[in-house]
């Protein structure tokens, strides 16, 4: 029996690319989007192998309902890919309360609601794989992306804990850590109202060298991930990702070690 994959944010970018890659490999795919019309081409091409569903991941009740519909339609949910999200750009000081809450509602709480919804199904199956689309910015932060960084850092803590809790039930958890990709997340995101005191920083950041990956090039890696019998807790995507994170952690470790005498003294 073909495995069933539930993927959120499938209207474009990673989500659309991966959904089509799974369908081409013969998987059953439940693809969700806020605007389900963006998935019509998948429905026309792959017929009964794809179930398209409207979902706003901010809505917990809608998330629970979608999971129930997928389970009833395909009989199982073997893999959940929490891909839905967007990027709020701007300095920390610039973010309004509504912007900050909205960033977490989608990126963090949306991930949490879907994860909680599929866990009883996967526990009953004694198998499953939950894939959380995080970012290298969930491991090492960059300026003018503070709320986005924070939402991804939160997903890292949630998912690493989750992996330890559900391993006993035969459920795997993987954090996918892409570097920058030429994706419309950067064109459809939201920017806070600018404070001119940060203009210089933003200009320097925007002019820094960027090596963006090609979204379509990630499809084989994601297929390998879902077909792995022993998937990793973290999978980096792109040639920039691991070097960027390694450099960040090397700098952190250097400072932590320099202050270690103070830390040990504080133990008492």
Image (cartoon, helix red, strand yellow):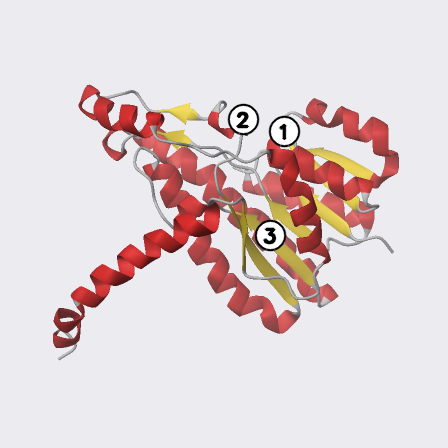
Which tag is nearer the camera, tag 3 or tag 2?
2
Find out whether the residues at labels 2 and 1 contact each other: C-beta distance under 8 Å.
yes
Label 2 neighbourhood size at 10 Å, few (<14), some (14-19), many (20+)?
Answer: few
Quarter of the image that includes the N terminus: bottom right
Could you tell me residue 243's position as x and y percent? 43, 50
**For numbered disc 2, what is the local secondary structure?**
helix
Residue 101 locus on image (x, y percent): 38, 36
Tell me the CA gap for discs 3 and 2: 21 Å
The x, y position of residue 159, in whole percent, is: 50, 57
Who is closer to the viewer here, 112 or 5?
5
How many marks do you count on the picture? 3
Marks 3 and 1 sit apart, C-alpha to C-alpha, by 18 Å
The residue that mark 1 highlights is: 12
Residue that mark 3 sits on: 131
**Residue at image point 57% right, 57% down:** 174
Depicted 203 relative to depicted 73: above or below: above
Q: Secondary structure at mark 3?
A: strand
Residue bearing the label numbered 2: 184
């Amino acid at each position: 029996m073909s495995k069933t994959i539930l993927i959120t944010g499938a209207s474009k970018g990673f989500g659309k690319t991966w959904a089509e890659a799974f369908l081409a490999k013969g998987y059953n795919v439940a693809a969700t989007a806020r605007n389900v019309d963006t998935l019509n081409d998948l429905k026309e091409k792959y017929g009964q192998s794809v179930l398209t569903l409207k979902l706003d991941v901010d809505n917990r009740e809608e998330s629970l309902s979608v999971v129930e519909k997928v389970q009833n339609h395909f009989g199982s949910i073997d893999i959940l890919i929490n891909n839905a999200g967007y990027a709020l750009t701007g300095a920390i000081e610039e973010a309004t309360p509504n912007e900050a809450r909205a960033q977490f509602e989608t990126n963090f709480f949306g991930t949490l609601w879907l994860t909680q919804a599929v866990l009883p199904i996967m526990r009953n199956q004694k198998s499953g794989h939950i894939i959380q689309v995080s970012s290298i910015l969930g491991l090492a932060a960059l300026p003018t992306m503070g709320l986005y960084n924070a939402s991804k850092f939160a997903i890292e803590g949630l998912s690493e804990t989750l992996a330890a809790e559900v391993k006993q039930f035969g459920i795997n958890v993987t954090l996918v850590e892409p570097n920058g990709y030429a994706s419309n997340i950067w064109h459809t995101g939201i920017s806070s109202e600018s404070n001119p005191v940060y203009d210089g920083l933003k200009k320097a950041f925007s002019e820094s060298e960027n090596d963006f990956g090609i979204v379509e090039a990630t499809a084989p890696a994601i297929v390998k991930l879902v077909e792995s019998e022993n998937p990793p807790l973290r999978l980096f995507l792109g040639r920039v990702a691991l070097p960027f994170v390694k450099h960040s952690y090397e700098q952190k470790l250097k400072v932590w070690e320099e202050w270690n005498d103070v830390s040990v003294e504080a133990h008492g």
